Image (cartoon, rainbow, N blue to C red):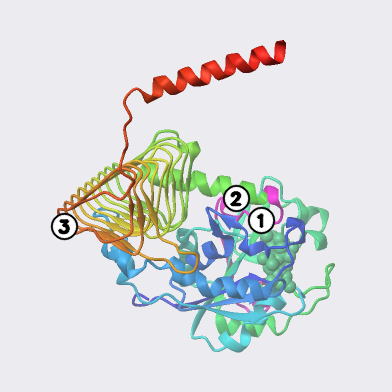
């Protein structure tokens, strides 16, 4: 928190049933950009500097709570990955920042409206010495800049700040009723609105910023005397005004406030999210040959002068260094790619793959939890898992690390400048020393010392002329059988 800035807590509403998704999965766990929607909202709360984050759960609450506990770990860069960060991929600053707030869970057993949902956080936040930002778990596209604009408006002296937008089709949204001076007087829900009020195009996003003490105090005074029979969060505006407090609206584009209620909304949210991330990468100096075919995650970092060919998925936890070249149909998750490395086409990098500068990972290669050293090559048809490959080593086509014995995983260590012959099976745990070689088709079950050549396959036997004699015998046999059948 910078000097003079209000302390901030966030309340994320995620108790609704989400029945229109027609899903067994709680709505806020449906993914956008490869991550649950609520992870985006959590990231927003953290980016806004929230010192406390309270998530209100109800329907599917156990599952939401469980996912939330493992999200922060996945979110934060793991130490080893950060150490190996390709230069220029950025984000070093994240490690200097204060520890991000862990989400605290509160239950709303019965869904009695948005105001009731926020009030569930009162036992945790009623005395919080700062502001509360209310966010929805199913509205994943709001930007930190937008929250900052709301914070600025709070600093300008308004007690309650509401995020609004001009809707193309205002439909069921709450309408923002402003006074002659432009400040907010009240919010009226569509189903409670008069025809004149329904004609107002300015709508409520649901995002609210207010001092904690005032917010919970106002909530405690509200009733459910409305068309829905619910306690409306939106009623705090009129209640604040009645106490002589001012309320204001901050506007944002409608795409930011897109809330997900149906699978069609989810597809729209994905499209809007991807469009935004692609634009950000283009502006940061990344070449996307066909941006509309590249799928990105919220947290992926791609350095300037990386080149991404058409049809690539860059999932969560990916960091790509400058000048790296990601060729078509590659799928990347939880990996780092060093400067000038080449990946694909058709490569799959799974979590824990660390590809050093100038290395090459070619077609139909899968790498998981493995370090590939500088300028090493794994060019064709290989699986490298739970392994380390030294610099400038060459992994031949069809090499497989046999890392799994059906119960446990084991490591394979390959030294610098080693040469692994095509179609080698490396039965882990096993090591191949620096500058050692394996013969093609070997099944390596014992360690190979530095500089040694290991061949582990049956010796070849060659019989001169046997192929021709064998063919002649087979042809004669066929002729004899045909005659027998016909005569
Ligand atoms: C709400 C706003 C409306 C605004 C719209 C924007 C109120 C009364 N209305 O309406 O002005 O235009 O959002 O999308 O606030 N939730 C709970 N517990 C509850 C009820 C809701 O956790 O008891 C959660 C839902 O899971 C959802 C969010 O709060 O994430 C909004 O609830 P929803 O029922 O969608 O509100 P709307 O009727 O859309
Ligand atoms: Mg809604």
Which residue bears the numbered disc 1? 260
Write the residue at 20% across / 48% down: 392
Kindly indicate whether the residue at mark 1 contacts the one at mark 2 (C-beta within 8 angstroms).
yes
Kindly indicate whether the residue at mark 1 contacts the one at mark 3 (C-beta within 8 angstroms).
no
Q: Nearer the viewer, mark 3 or mark 1?
A: 3
Classify residue 75 as left or right of residue 26: left
Write the residue at 18% across / 54% down: 416
Tell which quarter ligand 1 is in: bottom right
Q: Residues within 10 Å of mark 2 (few under 14, many from 20)?
A: many
> Which of the marked residues, 2 or 3, is nearer the chain's N terminus?
2
Q: Residues within 10 Å of mark 3 (few under 14, many from 20)?
A: some
> Which quadrant is the N terminus positioned in?
bottom left
Distance from Cα at disc 3 to Cα at disc 1: 58 Å
Q: Is residue 258 magenta?
A: yes
Q: Nearer the viewer, mark 2 or mark 3?
A: 3
- Helix or strand or loop: what does disc 1 sit on? loop
**Image height of 335 relative to 126, above or below:** above
Read off the magenta span.
237-264
Query: In the image shown, does 287 or 193 lie closer to the viewer?
Result: 287
**Image height of 400 relative to 422, above or below:** below
> Which quadrant is the C terminus positioned in?
top right
Task: Give the image location of residue 118, x and y in percent.
Answer: 65, 77
């Amino acid at each position: 928190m910078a000097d003079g800035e209000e302390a901030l807590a966030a309340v994320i509403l995620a108790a609704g049933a989400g029945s229109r998704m027609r899903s067994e999965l709680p709505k806020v766990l449906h993914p956008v950009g490869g991550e649950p929607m609520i992870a985006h909202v959590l990231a927003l709360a953290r980016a806004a500097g929230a010192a406390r984050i309270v998530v209100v759960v109800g329907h599917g609450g156990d599952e939401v709570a469980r996912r939330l506990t493992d999200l922060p770990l996945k979110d934060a860069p793991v130490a080893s990955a950060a150490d190996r960060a390709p230069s220029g991929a950025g984000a070093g600053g994240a490690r200097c920042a204060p520890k991000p707030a862990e989400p605290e869970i509160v239950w709303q057993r019965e869904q009695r409206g948005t105001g009731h949902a926020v009030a569930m956080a009162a036992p945790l936040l009623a005395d919080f010495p700062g502001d509360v930002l209310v966010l929805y778990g199913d509205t994943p596209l709001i930007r930190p800049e937008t929250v900052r604009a709301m914070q600025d408006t709070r600093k300008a002296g308004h007690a309650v700040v509401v995020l609004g937008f001009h809707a193309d089709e205002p439909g069921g949204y709450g309408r923002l009723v402003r006074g002659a001076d432009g400040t907010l007087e009240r919010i009226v829900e569509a189903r409670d609105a008069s025809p004149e009020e329904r004609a107002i195009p300015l709508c409520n996003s649901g995002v609210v910023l207010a001092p904690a003490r005032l917010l919970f105090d106002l909530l405690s005074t509200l009733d459910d005397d409305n068309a829905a029979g619910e306690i409306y969060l939106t009623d705090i505006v009129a209640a604040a005004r009645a106490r002589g407090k001012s309320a204001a609206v901050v506007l944002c584009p409608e795409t930011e406030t897109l809330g997900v209620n149906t699978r069609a909304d989810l597809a729209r949210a994905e499209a809007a999210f991807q469009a935004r991330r692609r634009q950000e990468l283009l502006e940061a100096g990344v070449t996307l040959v066909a941006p509309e075919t590249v799928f990105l995650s919220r947290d992926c970092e791609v350095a300037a002068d990386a080149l991404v060919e058409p049809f690539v998925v860059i999932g969560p936890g990916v960091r790509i260094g400058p000048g790296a070249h990601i060729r078509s149909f590659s799928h990347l998750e939880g990996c780092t790619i060093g400067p000038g490395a080449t990946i694909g086409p058709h490569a799959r990098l799974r979590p824990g793959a660390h590809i050093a500068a100038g290395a090459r990972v070619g077609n139909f290669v899968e790498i998981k939890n493995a370090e590939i050293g500088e300028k090493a090559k794994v060019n064709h048809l290989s699986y490298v898992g739970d392994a380390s490959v030294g610099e400038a080593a060459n992994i031949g086509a069809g090499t497989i690390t046999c890392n799994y014995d059906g119960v446990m995983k084991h490591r394979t260590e390959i030294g610098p400048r080693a040469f692994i012959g095509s179609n080698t099976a490396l039965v882990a745990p096993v090591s191949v020393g620096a500058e050692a070689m394996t013969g093609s088709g070997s099944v390596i079950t014992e360690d190979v010392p530095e500089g040694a050549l290991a061949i582990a396959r049956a010796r070849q036997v060659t019989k001169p002329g046997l192929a021709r004699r064998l063919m002649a015998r087979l042809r004669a046999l066929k002729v004899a059988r045909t005659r027998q059948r016909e005569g």
